[in-house]
């Protein structure tokens, strides 16, 4: 039989998660058994030749179920059902697909977000099957980057605090700030809440001060944290600061930053992962696809 598409696999994968925590690799084997795939079908590779097609589709099924909140990843390489997922299975639909998952809060944000162990290839979803090739390529690119950014945030949330502070320094340097790559992680109790500095000139006369704070994604950072940061800048006679968090900022905090006589830049979790991908920090390219088109100038000349 044909290898099922990743949306067809969503309901079987959710049922596997209902039995208890399971490794993704084990889920691939169980799905292959459930659909009676032959050895040839189990070993069939994606066009890139980098991953088995059935493994890729199970990976994407898990990713979409995670983003809808029906399953969660308690640790790397594993997944388990959530109370929301159990509620779905209490009255199971005939099929779980993207249209079904769109009812859950946050899922559509994941789907539309524009720009490890996340799936490395994706096939067009059914609603894009009638789109142009360019539309399908763009949609797949956005899906891949969306999954990458979400995994980045998951990894960042479990980093050691000092490693997170270094990541922010590396990002600022990767964005081109800092004279000759001059930046330093501080993050010591004696540094008054300043986690890092970036020297914008070789003599260190113009300095950007950094604060890097990790909070759960649902936590709103209030204005009091920005007042504390501004106070730390005052102690150093500084006027430029960048406050980075894995969560998001409350409206009052954004207003405070806008009104402050200091230059305070706020970077929330979504912007952080976007910048990391854009500037190639903590990520790396693994495959380059070059799209070509007809050279009309060549043919115009040849045709006289």
Image: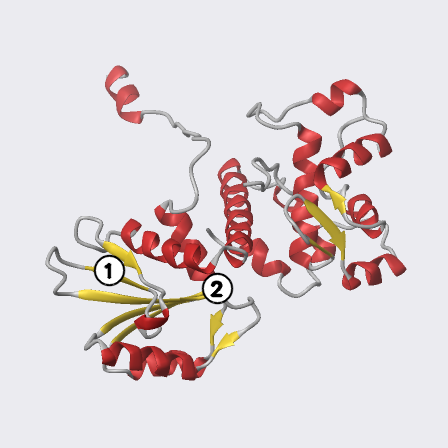
Return the disc, 2 or 1, that comes first in the chain's sequence: 1
Foreground mark, 2 or 1, reads 1
Q: Which image quadrant for residue 2?
A: top right
Assess disc 1: are there few (<14), some (14-19) or many (≥20) residues with their C-alpha within 10 Å of its C-alpha. many
Crowding near the residue tagged with mark 2, few <14, some 14–19, many ≥20 C-alpha atoms within 10 Å: many
User: Quick check: 241 left or right of 29?
Assistant: left
Q: Residue at x 26, y 62 (%)?
A: 197
Q: Mark 2: which secondary structure?
A: loop
Left or right? Give the position of 270 relative to 130. Answer: left
Question: Residue 124: x percent and y percent?
Answer: 61, 39
Residue at the spot of label 2 = 246
- Classify residue 276 as left or right of residue 204: right
Q: State the quadrant of the N terminus.
A: top right
Q: Quadrant of residue 251?
A: bottom left
What residue occupies the far front of the structure in this picture? 190
Task: State the CA–CA distance, disc 2 to disc 1.
Answer: 20 Å
Residue depicted at 82% across the width and 50% down the height = 20
Question: Which residue, given by chain and number where applicable, does mark 1 sit on?
Answer: 198
The residue closer to the viewer here, 194 or 227, is 194
Quadrant containing the C terminus is top left
Image position, residue 181 (x, y; %): 22, 49
Indicate the position of residue 94 as horizontal and vertical percent values: 86, 50
Residue 37 can be seen, yes or no: yes
The one nearer the camera, 245 or 53, is: 245
| Towards the viewer: 206 or 285 | 206
């Amino acid at each position: 039989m044909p290898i099922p598409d990743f949306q067809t696999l969503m309901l079987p994968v959710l049922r596997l998660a209902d039995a208890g925590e399971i490794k993704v690799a084990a889920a691939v084997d169980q799905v292959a058994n459930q659909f009676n795939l032959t050895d040839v079908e189990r070993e069939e590779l994606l066009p890139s030749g980098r991953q088995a097609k059935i493994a890729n589709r199970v990976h994407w099924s898990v990713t979409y179920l995670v983003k809808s909140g029906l399953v969660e990843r308690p640790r790397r390489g594993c997944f388990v059902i959530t109370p929301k997922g159990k509620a779905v299975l209490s009255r199971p639909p005939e099929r779980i697909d993207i249209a079904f998952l769109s009812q859950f809060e946050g899922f559509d944000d994941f789907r539309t977000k524009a720009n490890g162990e996340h799936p490395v290839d994706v096939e067009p979803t059914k609603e894009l099957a009638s789109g142009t090739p360019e539309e399908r390529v763009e949609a797949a690119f956005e899906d891949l980057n969306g999954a990458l950014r979400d995994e980045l945030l998951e990894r960042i949330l479990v980093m050691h605090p000092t490693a997170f502070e270094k990541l922010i320094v590396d990002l600022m340097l990767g964005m081109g700030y800092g004279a000759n790559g001059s930046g330093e992680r501080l993050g010591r109790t004696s540094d008054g809440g300043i986690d890092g500095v970036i020297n914008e000139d070789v003599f260190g006369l113009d300095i950007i001060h950094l604060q890097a704070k990790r909070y759960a994604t649902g936590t709103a950072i209030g204005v009091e944290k920005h007042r504390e940061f501004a106070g730390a800048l005052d102690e150093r006679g500084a006027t430029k600061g960048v406050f980075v968090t894995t969560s998001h900022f409350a409206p009052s905090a954004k207003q405070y930053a806008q009104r402050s006589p200091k230059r305070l830049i706020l970077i929330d979790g979504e912007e952080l992962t976007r910048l990391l991908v854009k500037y190639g920090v903590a990520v790396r390219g693994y495959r380059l696809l070059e799209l070509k088109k007809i050279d009309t100038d060549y043919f115009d000349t040849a045709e006289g």
